[in-house]
Amino acid sequence: MSEKALALVVRAIDWSETSRIATLWTRELGKVRALAKGGRRLGSNFESALDLLTVCRIVLLRKSSGSLDLLTEAQVVERFPRLRIDLAAFYAGCYIAELLADWTEDDDPHPKIFDEACAALRVLGDPPRATGLRLARFELVLLEELGYRPVFDRCAVCAAGVADNAAAAFSPSVGGMVCAKCRPGRRDSRPLGPNTRRAFQALAESDDAWRRDWPLAVQKELRLLLGEYVTYVRGRRPRLLGYVEKLSLPGHRGTPADSGGGDREPPSGQREDQAR
Amino acid sequence: MERLGAIERAIHELGKLPGIGPKTAERLTHYLLTADRSQVVALTDALRALKEAVRPCRQCFNPTEEELCRICRDPHRDSSVVCVVEQPRDLMALERTGTYRGLYHVLQGRLAPLENIGPEQLTIDALLERVRRGGIQEVIMATNPTLEGDGTALYISNLLANSGVRITRLARGIPSGGVLEFANTQMLADALEGRRAF
């Protein structure tokens, strides 16, 4: 039976001389994998719609379990031009594709995640210094939809309220903020500044909190804590997190010093230089 | 596991080649079995030479049997222009046009962060070194017009931004002989954006 859907291409690999296998994150069906016969030919029914991070309208022949679906048509609906002219936006876009491709189940639709991914891809790199924050908004929406929203309005251990300026910490293993009383013994916890806590809450609740001019130290702390939380929940460090931590920080210009390998951690001095 | 006989081994090895399924592999094996001995020996010699004699050109990384490839050795080529391509096959496609007289640089891939392919897996450092040595006035980015190809071109152009070299990229848009009505929206948008004076 054929089905139509709006899809974001999150991975595409060449399968033969002319065919491709695409991983598509659709608004209606969730993540699907499909074989596009002739998908590498320019004159095929797929035009150039199967390029990474392209939104396209697709027609899909669903197959029985265990075999790949067959993509019969794909038409470009939207591309994100800033990903091609801003290196930080390019890597951030790839990070979104990685999270969607590797962290979600097949056939589990979440229209809110789809819409949020497209909204993020539309504005990544504009303005350049907000790339990390825009990405954080996407990650928080993804975490919420998958049932892992971190707790920031109370202590995640004792559920007691924490005063705005009180000392607090963030622990990935308990899923959010821990108060000073519950922190001892939580070896994975890190200090959580009051402004960073406010930024987390604002980003989780508001569509446009990422546009605010958050201090650089807050942006840096937020990205670090969120990266650790995503790594903990997912069970392994996303491949592109290293790029994102470096490239989304203010001061990035796409120079060799700013860019580098995927899984490597940047030297701490470099991060501080960029934050300044 | 039982050791494979010569016929099974040949089918197995041929079946690993792109575009060749088990039936074609079997057909080819039986053809080779009945073919003239000299033909089969010539084929195996040619295959062995591919791996033993061919290596990347010291300058541009195009496959060659010499230190420098035919294009880099040619004194009539314009050595002030370097065209950057992803694969040797892209170089061959550009050569077939017969209009380009500059040199090339083969990256041996493109940045593909999702496949763990970063700048260190490509020949970007060698390109930077070529530019640093001087004599190059223009670098043409001829990576594929995909997101990853454009990302690779962007990465390199950032690195070369302060080198004083002119950086250009291939035009994109409607193919010659095409019809506007059937061009996709991206082609039309690219063609409009890249229009030039008559």
Image: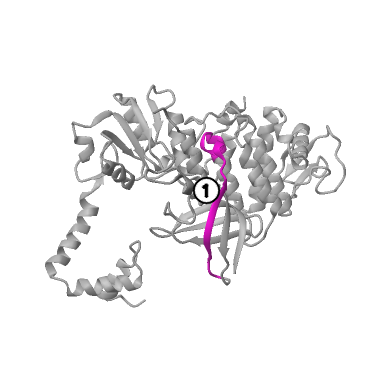
Q: Is residue B41 above or below residue A137?
A: below
**Image x and y of residue B119, in percent:** 43, 39
**B57 drawn magenta:** no
Is A83 covered by the magenta stretch?
yes
Q: Is residue B143 left or right of residue A21?
A: left
Is residue A114 placed above or below A224 in the rendered structure?
Answer: below
The one of B67 and A43 positioned closer to us in this rendering: A43
Residue A100, percent from left and from top: 61, 52
Q: Residue at x 52, y 35 (%)?
A: A87
* Residue B68 seen in render: no
Mark 1 = which residue?
A: A52
Q: Name the residue type under label 1.
A: Leu
Residue sitting at x 82%, y 45%: A155
Question: Residue at (34%, 25%) from the top-left corner?
Answer: B132
Q: How is the image coloured?
A: one colour
Q: In x, y percent, where is residue B8?
A: 29, 75
Outermost residue to the bottom: B2
Dot 1 alpha-carbon crowd within 10 angstroms: few under 14, some 14 to 19, many 20 or more: many
Q: Is residue B2 above or below residue B66?
A: below
Q: Nearer the viewer, residue A11 or B9?
A: A11
Indicate the secondary structure of the residue bearing disc 1: loop
Image quadrant in which the N terminus of chain A is located:
bottom right
For residue A118, what is the image quadrant? top right
Q: Output the chain of dot 1.
A: A
| Residue B186 can be seen in this image | yes
Q: Does A269 sit above or below residue A260?
A: above
Write down the quadrant of residue B43 in the picture.
Answer: bottom left
In the figure, is residue A207 to the left or right of B172? right
Q: Which residues are magenta?
A: A66-90
Residue A86, image quadrant: top right
